Image (cartoon, rainbow, N blue to C red):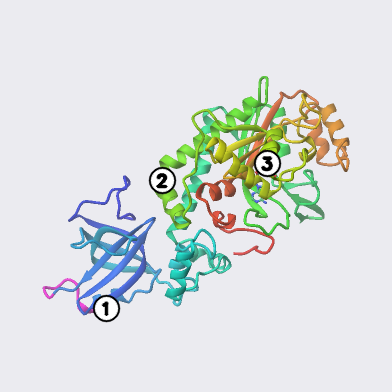
C-alpha cells in the first residue's frame, strides 16, 4: 500500500496488482465506457484508466462517477499495472498505466480551488523566462499567478511537483551538512531562541513580551555556540531558526530563516576552519548532484538555470578581500578599500570570479575589521583587516564567518573600541565575556543561510520559494 512504485523507484512490472493512495490531478469522462484519472504521487504522475465492460466488473455508472471526482481529492486506488498502448502525450504522465478496479475517495477536495496546481508549476512573472515564453502565455490568455497568491494558498501551492522537489532538496542539504560534520566529531546542539538581552546588535532584533519583562528573539546562535566551545564541546553545529527584524523587502531576505551554524577549535591557523567549511560545501554540492539530480534538474529547467559550476578538486578560490576590491576596480567599479560590498558589487565580483576561475563557489577572506561584529579576531598582519571570511554561491553571500576573540580581556577591549562602544557588563553580554575567563581554545566558525543555499543551488528568483511558510516584513501568515 501507499506507493505505486516500489522503494527502489522502478515501476512495478506489468500485470501486477497495486493498491495505493494518490491525489487526483484531473479526472474526465472520455465516453460512456471510458474515463481517465490522472493520479499524482510524489514527483510522479500515473495515468488511471476506468473502462466499463459488458462482462461485469466496472459499470458505466462507475465510469461516470470516477470521471467526476473533483481534482485534488485524495483517493485509494486498486488496479492492475499495464503499459499504455500508445505513448502518453502529456509530459507529466509516466509511461505507466493503471487499470483501475476500485477507487475510493478518502477525502474530497472542495471546489472551486483558490489556486490551480498547474499555476504552481510555472515560473514567477518576469523571472527566468524569455520573451518567447511570455508571448506564448499571452497568446494562450493565461496570466501567470503571482507569488503572493501562491503563498496565500501555500497548502495547495506545495502540492506542485516543483515545490515537492525544492523541499526534498532543502532537507537533503540539512542531512548532508549533518552527515559531514558528525563524521568529523561535531556534536549537534540546540541553543536558546529567546534571549534576555539584545546581544548581537540592537536594531534588527524582535522584542517579545516575556511575562513581566522583555525578551528578544535570537538573531543567531553565535554567542552560545562559542560559549560551548569554551565549555567542553570543541566542535559544534546547529540547524535552527534565526530571527531578524530587518525591514528588507528583497528577494533574498526573510525575517525568519534557518541557520546552519558551526563552530570549532583549531590548532594553529583559522584557515584550518576555512578549509573544513570549503570541504563541507563541496560535499554538500556533490551530494546534491548525486542524490537529488532528478529534483535539481526539474526545478532548474523551469527557470532555465545553468549548471552550478564547481571548482576543480581542492581548488576553491580563496580571494583576499583586497584582491577582490582590485578585481572590481579593474572592472570599473567604484569601491572603497574598507567598505562592505554592496549586493550589486557582490554579484559583479561573482561574475568576474566565474570568468577567471570557472566556478560559482568561492571564498572572500580577510574582510575589513570595521565591517565585522565585535567578536571577530583582528588580523595580526593588518590593523584594518580581520580573520574573517564570507562564502559565495553565484555571486551571493551564503555564509559569513570568522576567527573569534577567545581572550576575555581582549574581548572587552574590542567591545569598547566599537562605534558605538558596547558595554561588556550589560546583561547577556557579561555571561558571554565571562565564558572566556576560564580558558578557551582559539576557534572559528560560520553561519550559513539554508534558504539562500537552496535558492542559489536551484537558481530560484526569490528566497520565499525556498521557505515552506515564509516570514517577511509583510507576511506572517499562513
Ligand atoms: O551574515 P550573518 O548575519 O552572520 C551571522 O549570523 C553570524 N553570527 C555567523 C557567524 O558564525 N559569524 O548570517 C549568516 C548567513 C548569511 O550569509 C546568509 O546566508 C543568511 O545567514 N542570512 C539570511 N538569510 C535569509 N534572510 C536573511 N535576512 C538573512 N540574513 C542572513
Residue at the spot x=65%, y=45% of the render?
Answer: 346
Compute the Cα span from label 3 to label 2.
34 Å
Between 39 and 358, the one nearer to me in the picture: 358
Compute the Cα span from label 2 to label 1.
40 Å
Q: Quadrant of the C terminus?
A: bottom right
Q: Which mark is residue 293?
A: 2
Q: Main secondary structure of the magenta part?
A: loop
Q: Is residue 116 left or right of residue 372?
A: left
Compute the Cα span from label 1 to label 3.
67 Å
Q: Which residues are magenta?
A: 54-61
- From this view, report whether residue 45 is shown above or below residue 405: below
Mark in front: 1 vs 3 = 3
Residue 59 within the segment the image draws in magenta = yes
Residue that label 3 marks: 328
The x, y position of residue 427, in whole percent, is 84, 42
Q: Which mark is residue 64?
A: 1
The x, y position of residue 405, in whole percent, is 77, 29
The x, y position of residue 463, in whole percent, is 59, 54
Q: Please tell me how crowded label 1 is: few (under 14), some (14-19), or many (20+) other residues with Cα within 10 Å.
A: many
**Secondary structure category for the residue under label 3:** helix
Q: Quadrant of the N terminus?
A: bottom left
Residue 280 figure quarter: top right
Q: Can see residue 455?
A: yes
- Quarter of the render that holds ligand 1: top right
Amino acid at each position: 500500500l501507499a506507493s505505486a512504485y516500489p522503494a527502489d523507484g522502478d515501476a512495478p512490472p506489468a500485470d501486477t496488482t497495486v493498491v495505493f493512495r494518490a491525489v487526483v490531478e484531473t479526472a474526465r469522462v472520455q465516453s460512456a465506457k471510458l474515463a481517465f484519472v490522472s493520479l499524482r504521487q510524489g514527483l510522479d504522475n500515473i495515468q488511471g484508466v476506468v473502462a466499463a465492460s459488458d462482462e461485469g466488473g466496472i459499470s458505466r455508472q462507475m465510469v461516470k462517477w470516477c470521471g467526476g471526482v473533483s481534482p485534488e481529492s485524495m483517493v485509494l486506488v486498486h488496479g492492475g499495472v499495464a503499459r499504455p498502448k500508445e505513448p502518453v502525450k502529456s509530459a507529466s504522465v509516466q509511461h505507466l498505466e493503471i487499470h483501475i478496479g476500485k477507487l475510493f475517495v478518502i477525502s474530497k477536495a472542495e471546489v472551486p480551488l483558490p489556486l490551480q496546481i498547474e499555476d504552481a508549476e510555472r515560473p514567477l512573472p518576469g523571472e527566468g523566462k524569455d520573451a518567447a515564453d511570455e508571448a506564448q502565455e499571452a497568446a494562450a490568455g493565461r496570466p501567470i499567478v503571482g507569488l503572493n497568491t501562491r503563498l496565500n494558498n501555500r497548502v495547495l501551492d506545495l502540492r506542485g511537483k516543483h515545490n515537492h522537489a525544492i523541499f526534498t532538496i532543502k532537507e537533503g542539504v540539512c542531512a548532508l551538512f549533518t552527515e559531514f560534520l558528525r563524521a568529523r566529531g561535531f556534536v549537534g546542539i540546540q541553543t536558546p531562541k529567546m534571549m534576555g538581552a539584545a546581544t548581537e546588535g540592537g536594531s534588527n532584533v524582535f522584542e517579545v513580551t516575556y511575562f513581566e519583562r522583555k525578551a528578544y528573539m535570537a538573531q543567531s546562535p553565535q554567542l552560545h555556540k562559542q560559549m560551548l566551545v569554551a565549555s567542553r564541546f570543541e566542535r559544534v553545529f546547529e540547524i535552527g531558526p534565526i530571527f531578524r527584524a530587518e525591514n528588507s523587502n528583497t528577494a533574498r531576505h526573510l525575517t525568519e530563516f534557518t541557520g546552519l551554524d558551526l563552530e570549532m577549535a583549531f590548532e594553529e591557523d583559522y584557515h584550518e576552519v576555512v578549509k573544513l567549511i570549503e570541504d563541507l560545501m563541496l560535499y554538500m554540492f556533490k551530494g546534491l548532484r548525486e542524490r537529488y539530480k532528478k529534483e535539481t534538474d526539474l526545478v532548474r529547467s523551469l527557470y532555465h538555470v545553468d549548471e552550478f559550476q564547481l571548482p576543480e578538486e581542492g581548488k576553491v578560490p580563496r580571494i583576499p578581500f583586497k584582491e577582490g576590491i582590485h578585481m572590481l576596480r579593474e572592472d570599473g567599479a567604484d569601491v572603497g578599500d574598507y567598505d562592505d560590498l554592496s549586493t550589486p558589487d557582490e554579484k559583479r565580483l561573482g561574475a568576474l570570479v566565474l570568468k577567471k576561475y570557472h566556478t560559482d563557489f568561492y571564498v572572500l577572506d580577510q574582510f575589513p575589521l570595521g565591517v565585522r561584529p565585535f567578536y571577530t579576531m583582528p588580523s595580526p598582519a593588518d590593523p584594518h583587516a580581520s580573520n574573517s571570511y564570507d562564502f559565495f554561491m553565484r555571486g551571493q553571500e551564503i555564509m559569513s564567518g570568522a576567527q573569534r576573540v577567545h581572550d576575555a580581556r581582549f574581548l572587552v577591549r574590542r567591545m569598547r573600541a566599537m562605534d558605538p562602544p558596547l558595554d561588556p557588563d550589560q546583561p547577556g553580554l557579561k555571561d558571554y565575556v565571562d565564558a572566556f575567563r576560564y580558558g578557551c581554545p582559539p576557534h572559528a566558525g560560520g553561519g550559513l543561510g539554508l534558504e539562500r543555499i537552496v535558492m542559489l543551488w536551484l537558481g530560484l528568483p526569490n528566497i520565499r520559494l525556498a521557505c515552506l511558510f515564509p516570514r517577511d516584513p509583510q507576511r506572517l501568515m499562513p
